[in-house]
Amino acid sequence: MSVIKIEDVSKLFGFGDAATVALDEVSVTIEKGEFLAIMGPSGSGKTTLMNMIGLLDRPTYGQFMLDEKDVSKMRVNKRAKLRRDNIGFIFQSFHMLPKLSVLENVALPLAYKGVSQTKRLKRASAVLEQVGLSDREYFYPHQLSGGQMQRAAIARALVNSPSIIIADEPTGNLDTESTRVVMELLSEIHSMGNTILMVTHNPILTRYASRIIYMRDGSIVYDEASDVGQLPGRVERALQAVRTSREEERIAGVSDYLKAMPQKKSPKRTTTKNKKRHSAKRRTKS
């Protein structure tokens, strides 16, 4: 069953000759429970596509179906309700409110649903335990590490029990160890049946995805299914090409360095004959 179906969607910014095409007749269908990684250079349309799917923006042209509902022309209040109840967002820069505790930050989305304070704090506490932050409930954002902050952001995205998680560069500000922890957490969420859409520049992270699409100039240039835990074929080949190129550059660099080094003159070898001659000269002088 497809949870997202986009057909010939285009998004333009600006007007007339100054118009910029951010999405150019994009079509993609995403099934329930997929873990989709979206890659591409800056300006390729990744974030615009995510904003479209997350109901933060509208297509200029084309049709967008979410859970078999046409949301392309849906009114603002209905879109907001659908977004609140079905989609959780994880951002690169966390977006935690500095004057609220971690528990209050995570509980905040429930306030917009009219959930009582007691119930929303209880639910937030349960989700923080799920992401391993039960001992940080009453800390403030500035008291957390980057990895802890991102886990809190994931808890906030999960507190409404959404069916779709949109993660825009969720590990972009994290070190290697924190990246691994966050990705393992997203993998666990995926195994529970959630649909996850992740924008990333890190090809290694595609091993967590069941599918990868690559975008360029507002279009999808390839779309490939992959076994979770394995790098997609195109990504593996690209990484191998980079590794080979770097190794060749390294070897070439060493070779050029050796060529450029000043050559030391080899010391003259003193033969037995020369030794006798030098000894005779010393005896003559004496």
Image (cartoon, rainbow, N blue to C red):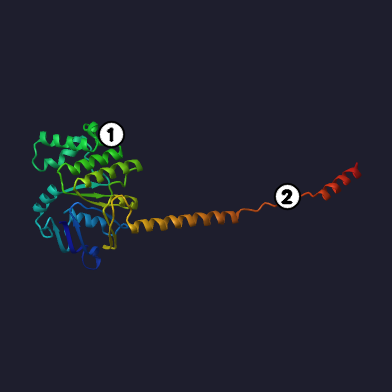
Is 76 displayed left or right of 239 in the figure?
left
Q: Position of residue 186 (x, y in %)?
A: 25, 45
Q: Position of residue 206 (x, y in %)?
A: 30, 52
Q: Residue at x 43, y 55 (%)?
A: 243
Three-letter amino acid code at disc 1? Gln
Contact between labelled residues 2 and 1, with CB atoms less than 8 Å apart: no
Q: Which disc number belongs to residue 190?
A: none
Q: Quadrant of the N terminus?
A: bottom left
* Residue identifier under label 2: 267
* Residue identifier under label 1: 143
Q: Would you say residue 100 is visible in this rendering?
A: no
Secondary structure of the residue carrying numbered label 1:
helix
Viewer-closest of 224 and 48:
224
Q: Would you say residue 23 is visible in this rendering?
A: yes
Q: Residue at x 28, y 53 (%)?
A: 227
Three-letter amino acid code at disc 2? Pro
Q: Nearer the viewer, mark 1 or mark 2?
A: 2
Task: Decide: is 251 above or below 9.
Answer: above
Q: Quadrant of the C terminus?
A: top right
Task: Decide: is 35 above or below 145.
Answer: below
- Residue 2's image quarter? bottom left
Q: Residue at x 15, y 60 (%)?
A: 64
- Using the numbered discs, state the Cα–Cα distance from disc 1 to disc 2 in whole angstroms: 66 Å
